[in-house]
Amino acid sequence: MGWSQQLVKLCFLSCSISILCTSLHHVSCKKVSLELYYESLCPYSAAFIVEHLAKIFDNGIIDIADLNLVPWGNAKLQTNNTFKCQHGEYECLLNTVEACAIDAWPDVNEHFPFIYCVENLVYQGKYLQWETCFKTLGLDDKPIADCVESEKGLQLDLKYAAETTALQPPHTYVPWVVVDGQPLYEVNSFSLAVSKFNSSK
């Protein structure tokens, strides 16, 4: 069975379970684990977030998925807990900004709109305007600024570095999508699964 078929089957199964859990209030059901390993200035990561991942918030898949974003990608740890990012220092900054957003607003429904806003600017080639996302979304920029400029930002980076390094099998590119512990090698199949889910509703 291909990855696209597996993900479609997983979505259908999870949807059925979700409906059952809704009808049987005393039954507790586990959500599907959905992890995205990415880096902020990677054009493919930005395109995936903007064109594909955002759709799960519109069609209900987010209700049956536990989405975990890991902004590290192909960055490399160096001596003294420093690191080098694939697309330069500004990518390191935005990786930390997005890590701090996840920490400041733990609810995915709160931090994803900010990350989407930043990545949409990356997608448009306007990433230097990322701070406009605070005003656009009516968010206070202080928690993020304080985090980025403190030891906390570094610790979050190191946390995501460790999570990415621990991947089995190791990631070979970004965006790297993992569904219930299994990598989705064909990113296009994610879009197919979303479309199949929509047509089943």
Image: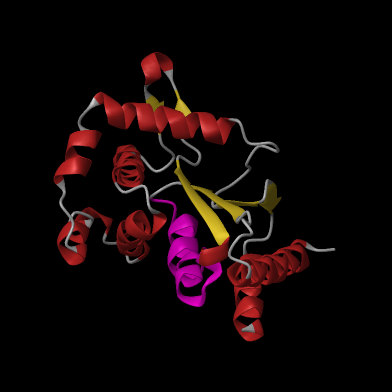
For the N terminus, which image quadrant? bottom right
Render colour scheme: secondary structure
Q: Does residue 119 appear in the picture of this structure?
A: no
If the image is split into quadrants, where does the C terminus sit?
A: bottom right
Residue at image position (39%, 43%) is 87
The magenta segment is 41-62
Q: Is residue 76 left or right of residue 197?
A: left
- Number of marks in the rendered image: 0
Most extreme residue toward the front is 26
Q: Measuring 23% from the left and 35% from the top, which residue is drawn there?
A: 147
User: Residue at coordinates 68% horizontally, 46% vertically from top-left?
Assistant: 181
**Residue 37 screen position, x and y as percent:** 52, 46
Whether residue 146 appears in this view of the structure is yes
Q: Measuring from the top left, give residue 111's x and y in whole percent.
A: 34, 54
Above-or-below relation of 160 to 197: above
Magenta segment, prevailing SS (helix, strand or loop): helix
Is residue 49 a member of the stretch shown in magenta?
yes
Horizontally, residue 102 falls left or right of residue 66, namely left
- Is residue 17 within the magenta segment? no
Corner quadrant of residue 113? bottom left
Q: Nearer the viewer, residue 120 or 19?
A: 19
On the image, the x and y values in percent for residue 19 come to 63, 72
Along the horizontal axis of the image, is 122 left or right of 29?
Answer: left
Of 8 and 95, the residue lying toward us: 8
Q: Position of residue 119 (x, y in %)?
A: 36, 59
Task: Judge whether 151 appears above or below 102 on screen.
Answer: above
Residue most toward the top? 80
Position of residue 159 relative to residue 137, above or below, is above
Q: Is residue 196 above or below residue 132?
A: below
